[in-house]
């Protein structure tokens, strides 16, 4: 691999990995020494790349309009198409509209030879089961997730048991037939998942739980990896 190719690959690795990323992690990903990573980061900075951080702490890569645009290979285009078309099939109306716009924007910047891979992908997802519609405004729930604002609602379990909950919303998960809210339940003091079609009298609170969302999500996915996921409510 030429040095210029290595620098381009390093930028892509830094885009992909959670920030800040240490030189040791970059060295493992790039299969080179940490000393080479330090030299390559200095070269990228000298070329105009915005890279915050330092040795011992980690690095964060910032996009710069003066750098060459990102280029996608065939597999990356297939992955993007699969993801966007899946959102168009499974997402709510706002996400479907956003996915259609993103697909059009992506198609506009791709080389002509790549465009058929985007519109007619080799892989696809389809669901033939009837989806249960919640009637909730998912865009407002997503705003509460991003803004880290608490929610209050009435909930009915599968067994028909009613309850009131105040939660810290972490993510909306689109399953085959239903959407569920992954949240930290203030009543149970633990993670819980709530089917959106069983949520009633939803109230958007001004109470902030910032900056806990990222840490809670890491804990949640850590439990899932260990097969000890949160209980459903």
Image (cartoon, rainbow, N blue to C red):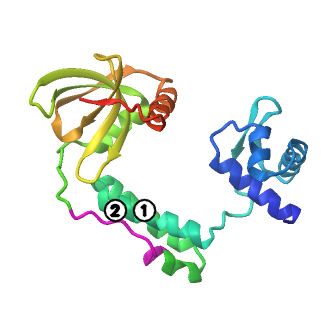
Kindly indicate the quadrant of the structure image that contains residue 50: top right
Q: Residue at x 31, y 24 (%)?
A: 167
Q: Reply above or below: 84 against 150.
A: below
Q: In the image, is 112 to the left or to the right of 228? A: right
Residue bearing mark 2: 88
Q: Is residue 64 visible?
A: no
- Locate residue 30, reporting x and y percent: 78, 52
Asked which secondary structure carries label 1, the reply is helix
Q: Residue at x 66, y 50 (%)?
A: 15
Q: Is residue 143 magenta?
A: no
Q: Residue furthest front?
A: 227
Q: Is residue 105 visible?
A: yes
Span colored in magenta: 118-128
For the residue carrying disc 2, how many other residues have a C-alpha within 10 Å: few (<14), some (14-19), or many (20+)?
some
CA distance separating discs 2 and 1: 6 Å
Residue bearing mark 1: 84
Q: Is residue 119 magenta?
A: yes
Main SS class of the magenta portion in the image: loop
Taking depth in this image into account, of 232 and 166 the one nearest to the observer is 232
Q: Are marks 2 and 1 in contact (CB under 8 Å)?
A: yes
- Locate residue 59, reporting x and y percent: 74, 38
Name the image quarter holding the C terminus: top left
């Amino acid at each position: 691999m030429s040095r210029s190719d290595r620098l381009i690959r390093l930028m892509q690795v830094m885009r992909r990995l959670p920030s800040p990323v240490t030189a040791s992690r970059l060295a493992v990903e790039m299969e080179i020494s940490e000393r080479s990573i330090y030299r390559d980061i200095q070269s990228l900075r000298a070329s105009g790349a915005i890279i915050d951080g330092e040795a011992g702490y980690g690095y964060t890569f910032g996009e710069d309009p003066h750098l060459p645009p990102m280029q996608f290979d065939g597999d990356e285009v297939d992955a993007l198409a699969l993801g966007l078309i899946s959102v168009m099939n499974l997402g709510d109306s706002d996400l479907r509209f956003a996915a259609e716009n993103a697909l059009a924007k992506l198609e506009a910047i791709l080389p002509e030879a790549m465009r058929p891979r985007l519109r007619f992908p080799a892989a696809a997802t389809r669901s033939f089961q009837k989806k249960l519609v919640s009637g909730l405004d998912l865009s407002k729930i997503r705003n509460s997730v991003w803004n880290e604002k608490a929610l209050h609602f009435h909930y009915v379990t599968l067994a028909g048991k009613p309850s009131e909950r105040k939660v810290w919303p972490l993510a909306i998960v689109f399953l085959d037939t239903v959407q569920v809210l992954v949240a930290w339940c203030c009543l149970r003091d633990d993670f819980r998942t709530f089917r959106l079609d069983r949520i009633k009298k939803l109230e958007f609170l001004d109470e902030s739980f910032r900056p806990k969302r990222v840490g809670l999500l890491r804990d949640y996915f850590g439990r899932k990896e260990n097969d000890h996921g949160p209980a459903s409510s």
